[in-house]
Image (cartoon, rainbow, N blue to C red):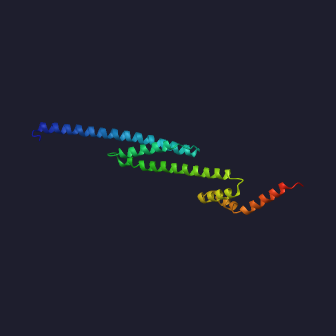
Amino acid sequence: LAKTPAEKQSIAEVQAKLAADDRRRQSERESAFTEELNDIKKRVATLENDVKDGEVPNDTIYDQLQADLNRMALSGNGIPNSLTGQLKPLELRVQATRKQVLADKRYLESLRKITQTVGNISQFQTVLQAHAREFPERVESADFQIVAGEVDIWKDIDQWRSFFLDRRF
């Protein structure tokens, strides 16, 4: 469309300004994405450290991290893969931490049930066996299986104790 050298020069200048503006906006988008990514990395690291220290985060923390990661993934168009590619590993870390916390809760609940059933032979045997099945990798599970298999000995001891308590010597 430009016919004269001055018009061509003017169009080239406008195109250069537009390209510079595009680069500046892209740089701002990448900086904002990087800043938010770094914030999420810190939050994930804090979550992992809290769990290592024995704290049990509430579900809101996981849900908010997941929502932020999803939002960033959706807003990542035009962001280099070197940045957007860091989202999935963070998501996997959050999921793994949540899974570990849930497993720890189940484990502690299983131990609580064992404690609650002490004194009731059949329930105690049942929860020991259930614990050993659910947590076979735990050190105590093999011992719990052995103890659960000794139910006849428990009953004999209980009968002997009852007999002895009923007698006055």
Image quarter of the N terminus: top left
Residue at 64% over, 56% down: 127
Q: Is residue 132 above or below residue 3?
A: below
Residue at 60% over, 60% down: 133
Image quarter of the C terminus: bottom right
Q: Is residue 50 left or right of residue 123?
A: left
The count of marks equals 0
Q: Is residue 73 left or right of residue 121?
A: left
Closest to the observer, 73 or 101:
101
Given the current orientation, which residue lies at the most extreme left position? 3
Task: Indicate the position of residue 58 as horizontal and vertical percent values.
Answer: 52, 43
Residue at 71% over, 57% down: 121
Whether residue 167 is visible to the viewer of this picture, yes or no, is yes
Whether residue 86 is visible to the viewer of this picture, yes or no, is no
Residue 156 image-quadrant placement = bottom right
Task: Indicate the position of residue 33 as horizontal and vertical percent values.
Answer: 38, 41
Task: Indicate the position of residue 119 as horizontal and vertical percent values.
Answer: 72, 53
Task: Indicate the position of residue 166 as horizontal and vertical percent values.
Answer: 84, 55
Given the current orientation, which residue lies at the most extreme front position? 166
Closest to the observer, 88 or 5:
88
Q: Is residue 135 left or right of residue 22?
A: right
Q: Is residue 157 left or right of residue 44?
A: right
